[in-house]
Image (spheres, coloured by chain):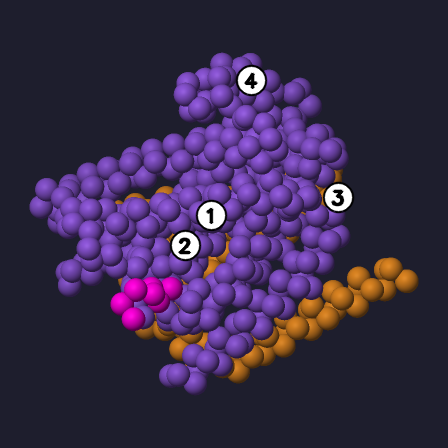
Chain colours: A orange, B purple
Amino acid sequence: MHLFLFLLFGAFCAGGAVNLLIQRKTINSALSLIVVMGSLALIYLLLGAEFVAVVQVIIYAGAIMVLFIFVIMLLNAGEEEHVKGSNVAMIFGIPGLFGGGIIGIWVLLQHGPEEKHIPIGALYGPADKVGMMLFTKYLLAFEATSILVLIAIMGAVVLARRSHS
Amino acid sequence: MSALTFLIVALIKIAVTLGVLLTVVAYTVWLERKLVGRMQNRWGPSRVGPFGLLQPLADGIKFLLKEDLTPPYVEKNIYLLAPGLALIMALTSIALVPIGPIVHLFGISTPVQITGVVNASGQVGDINVGILIVLGITSLGVYGIALAGWSSNSKYSLLGSLRASAQMVSYEVSLGLSLVGVLLMSSTLSLSGIVHAQLGTWFGFIPQWYIFRGQVVAFFIYMMAAFAETNRIPFDLPEAETELVAGYHTEYSAMKFAMFFMAEYANMVTVACIASVMFLGGWSGPPLPFLPVAVQAFLPLVWFSSKIFFFLFLYIWIRGTLPRFRYDQLMAFGWKFLFPLALANVIVTAFFVAIRA
């Protein structure tokens, strides 16, 4: 059952990602990205990390993608222009993709953690455990992220102000 | 409990809850027309059945039989997807709401909650991030409205859905923050856990609901944000009929329009459920020991439904009372008043929780 669900949502995720690249209408691409985010959340859920799964849905699918759609609606972006693929990209891109993929997998297999796969339901699920880790082990990274967000907000305010005057 | 029993019980619970929810949705429309009618010195629906009680049925038949127009200039796939999305998101979150305590029927014990089970120690076990899932589903509900307005390819629809998505995204922040105080005090994210944290009483009759335990401000923030989330008066700018015809569902007809309509009312019910679970103790209430045992068994359902009725009545009452906000007022109110107030509430609550710990 778990394996079936994993394969199903993995297929959704990969299919959505490919569709995101193929589609020429921006709105369809954005919708495929939502499918990708949703399937990722369900894969987290299968791994037992229910808090991370829900946060994935709230933040990525519920907030960030809504803003994407909002901007697409506001600009009324239509279809992309179709260009014929460049030959250089064809010649170097496809072998490069395979080569890079193989190197990446090889590095992961060589230097990755001892266990090659995470068993289903093995991640830190409950919110209290995630919170505990955030505020003890990963406190520095957590606080640094909040400064990063603050800088981004300030940047947005500055940009918005400038366009008015 | 074997897998088959579990499946059957779950299916029965889903069927009953969905049936009750849809009936409540239909009769909320009737109640609204009737009450607003009385408030404006009219009769409201009075022709179909006694007191117009069969009016929702007549409306339903009308929606089914009307011609389903699809304008030629719409973005077809998304146009067809949007109403379904809105309705599904509105109906899903009721699954997480604890409607009643554990019931024992035909040798099976199960809580009156679709996602709840009785675990080995005889306690209610439900999803331990329940409230976050409700918030997640609510935030996905924006897509139905946003896509409907965009795909209709009409300026009224587009403006309506732009307003709706901006408004819902803005008020979601205050809505979420207003719940944090309760979560700090109950130290759980599971909805049935939150109800169980409010079961006690003071002096034997005042229930220990969070609204009486210092979360009054949070309750009012939640209610105001909830009105904006469900696009109700005084925040119903997305469908302001004097400016935008009908807002995001201008181009929809027949059943597709009805789906948006049902989604809006189902959202009202969900928001009322969450408000009563978080602040008013869900299905708990002051104990009434003088009632016979057979009546006692039904008390939780009575408490819960009377709380929901109170909120639905409040929605209609405010609709009959207040005018609509201007859009800049709406945004200023959300960001400059509700949001700082919700933050202050979180800080003060955290302070008191820390002192008591």
Tell me the residue that label 3 is attached to: A75
Q: Is residue B291 visible?
A: yes
Q: Nearer the viewer, mark 3 or mark 2?
A: 2
Mark 4 lies on a secondary structure that is loop
User: Residue drawn 54% across and 21% down?
Assistant: B254
- In the rendered image, which quarter is residue B88 located in? top left
- In the rendered image, which quarter is residue B331 located in? bottom right
Indicate the position of residue B274 as horizontal and vertical percent values.
Answer: 43, 53
Tell me the residue that label 2 is attached to: B276
Chain holding disc 4: B
In magenta, the rendered stretch is B203-209
Closer to us: A6 or A141 = A141
Residue B82 lies, with reference to residue A164, above or below; the image says: above
Check contact, mark 3 vs mark 4: CB within 8 A: no
Residue B209 lies, with reference to residue A65, above or below; the image says: below
Residue B254 lies, with reference to residue B163, above or below; the image says: above
Q: Nearer the viewer, mark 4 or mark 1?
A: 1
Tell me the residue that label 1 is attached to: B311
Which amino acid, by three-letter code, is at mark 3? Answer: Leu
Label 1 to label 2: alpha-carbon separation: 9 Å
User: Residue drawn 51% across and 30% down?
Assistant: B34
Indicate the position of residue B57 as horizontal and vertical percent values.
Answer: 43, 21
Label 2 to label 4: alpha-carbon separation: 38 Å
- Residue B68 disc label: 4
Which amino acid, by three-letter code, is at mark 2? Answer: Ser
